[in-house]
Image (tube, rainbow, N blue to C red):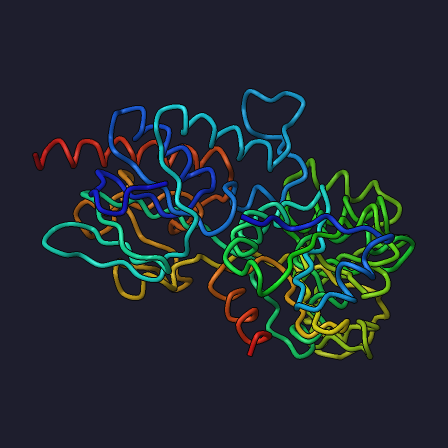
């Protein structure tokens, strides 16, 4: 089962922007309780959408440049990138079924 | 993984302190018990950087950590945990059936401990700017407002805790409260009044959140005079209370005007074998220890109910 990849400023371009698949990026931080609540759901989705959508995690504390570039002001934020551009922006805790709807929409 | 084919003695909906405490008691009583939680366990305390008033922790304990500890304790006694979203509840031949996104579970007794979520302002601009300056979690988002001006809406313990936390990052924190005094406890008030970064706007409510790509200002209304005025801010943290998570219950049990479940002091709802515990209850004091107490009572009464129906 595939797991979300931890992404940093050094490989964000390669892993997220240049990916040939849509990528869900989970913006999170250690101090954020709801981020920890979202994490196991993102882990499960990574398994269920393996091969169709890639999953990445950005620690906003360690990668403030990426967070600033995408104007993250609230976490957890889940952003779905397609062909290098954010397609969908989900702020705060959401149940799994709702996240699946967003992912299915991006897959069309 | 919970065994979907097997029937349970007890199903607990919600993995906050009430549900986890019920889980500790029920599982320790050798009842076959499953707890359904849609995210990670912990509930609202996961939003608390530190819990300072739970007995046994004189130096406080992290909110997430306390949730994890309670979960570990319940797991030790055999509690099963299912990560799924409850979509409905019904009675079928006396059994309590819980429908989830992934299937169905049934049990002899049901403990509803699905807690509460943040109340929104329900004003124009709030949804549009959520994640763009409007926030419902200061511990999560304070770090994005270094040297900025932020507003906190509310006057209870949660609001004042958030205002104090924000002073570590923001340059100016303005508490907007609809009354002329705080509801927060004395110790919280003292800390807030002593903090030079915190200012207060009394008798005022937010009518609109304004901005371009991000929040730039609030349109406020002074309740004493009914006149409007504007306040420039970079962010607004909403902390005006909580709303019980009872929508999935529809008309299953009796609720009050706010949607909270009505129980007696045995945690019994009007339906035999169906209990409620924690913040979801009518007139809950919304404290970890009270939720834990509710959970223990619900589990003990559930055990009695099951024993009486054997």
Query: Residue shown at 37%/29% (left/top)?
Result: B24
Q: Position of residue B293 (x, y in %)?
A: 40, 32
Q: Tell me if residue B293 comes above or below residue B199 in the rendering.
A: above
Of B208 and B37, nearer the camera is B37
Q: Tell me if residue B54 comes above or below residue B259 in the rendering.
A: above
Left or right position of B144 against B18: right
Query: Residue shown at 47%/28% (left/top)?
Result: B72
Of A27 and B41, nearer the camera is A27
Residue B256 sits in quarter: bottom left
Left or right position of B191 against B284: right
Q: Position of residue B253 (x, y in %)?
A: 26, 58
Q: Position of residue B125 (x, y in %)?
A: 69, 77
Q: Position of residue A87 (x, y in %)?
A: 69, 75
- Count the marks: 0
Looking at the rendered image, the quarter that the C terminus of chain A falls into is: bottom right
Q: Tell me if residue B142 comes above or below residue B299 in the rendering.
A: below
Residue B99 sits in quarter: bottom left
Residue A99 sits in quarter: bottom right
Query: Residue shown at 50%/59% (left/top)?
Result: A95
Of B110 and B40, nearer the camera is B40
């Amino acid at each position: 089962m595939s797991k979300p990849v931890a992404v940093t400023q050094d490989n964000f371009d390669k892993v997220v922007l240049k990916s040939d698949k849509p990528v869900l990026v989970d913006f999170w931080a250690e101090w954020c309780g709801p981020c920890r609540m979202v994490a196991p759901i993102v882990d499960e989705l990574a398994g269920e959408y393996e091969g169709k959508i890639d999953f990445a995690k950005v620690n906003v504390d360690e990668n403030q440049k990426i967070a600033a570039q995408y104007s993250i002001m609230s976490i957890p934020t889940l952003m779905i990138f397609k062909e290098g551009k954010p397609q969908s922006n989900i702020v705060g805790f959401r149940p799994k079924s709702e996240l699946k709807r967003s992912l299915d929409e991006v897959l069309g | 993984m919970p065994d979907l084919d097997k029937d349970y003695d007890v199903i607990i909906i919600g993995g906050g302190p009430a549900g986890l405490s019920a889980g500790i008691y029920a599982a320790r009583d050798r009842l076959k018990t499953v707890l359904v939680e849609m995210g990670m366990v912990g509930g609202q305390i996961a939003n608390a950087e530190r819990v300072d008033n739970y007995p046994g922790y004189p130096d406080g304990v992290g909110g997430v950590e306390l949730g994890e500890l309670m979960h570990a304790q319940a797991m030790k006694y055999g509690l099963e945990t299912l990560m799924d979203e409850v979509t409905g509840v019904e009675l079928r031949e006396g059994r309590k059936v819980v429908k989830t996104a992934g299937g169905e579970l049934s049990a002899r007794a049901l403990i509803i401990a699905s807690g509460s979520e943040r109340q929104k302002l329900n004003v124009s601009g709030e949804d549009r700017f959520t994640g763009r300056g409007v926030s419902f979690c200061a511990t999560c988002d304070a770090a994005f407002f270094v040297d900025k001006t932020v507003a906190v809406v509310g006057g209870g313990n949660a609001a004042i805790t958030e205002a104090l936390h924000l002073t570590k990052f923001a340059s100016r924190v303005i508490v907007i409260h609809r009354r002329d005094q705080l509801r927060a406890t004395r110790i919280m008030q003292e800390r807030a009044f002593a903090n030079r970064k915190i200012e207060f706007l009394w008798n005022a409510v937010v009518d609109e959140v304004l901005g371009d790509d991000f929040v730039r200002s609030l349109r406020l209304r002074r309740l004493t005079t009914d006149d409007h005025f504007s306040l420039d801010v970079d962010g607004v943290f909403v902390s005006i209370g909580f709303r019980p998570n009872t929508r999935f219950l529809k008309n299953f049990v009796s609720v009050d005007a706010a949607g909270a479940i009505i129980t007696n002091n045995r945690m019994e709802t009007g339906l035999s074998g169906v209990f409620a515990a924690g913040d979801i209850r009518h007139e809950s004091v919304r404290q970890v220890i009270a939720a834990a107490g509710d959970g223990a009572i619900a589990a003990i009464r559930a055990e009695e109910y099951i024993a009486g129906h054997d």
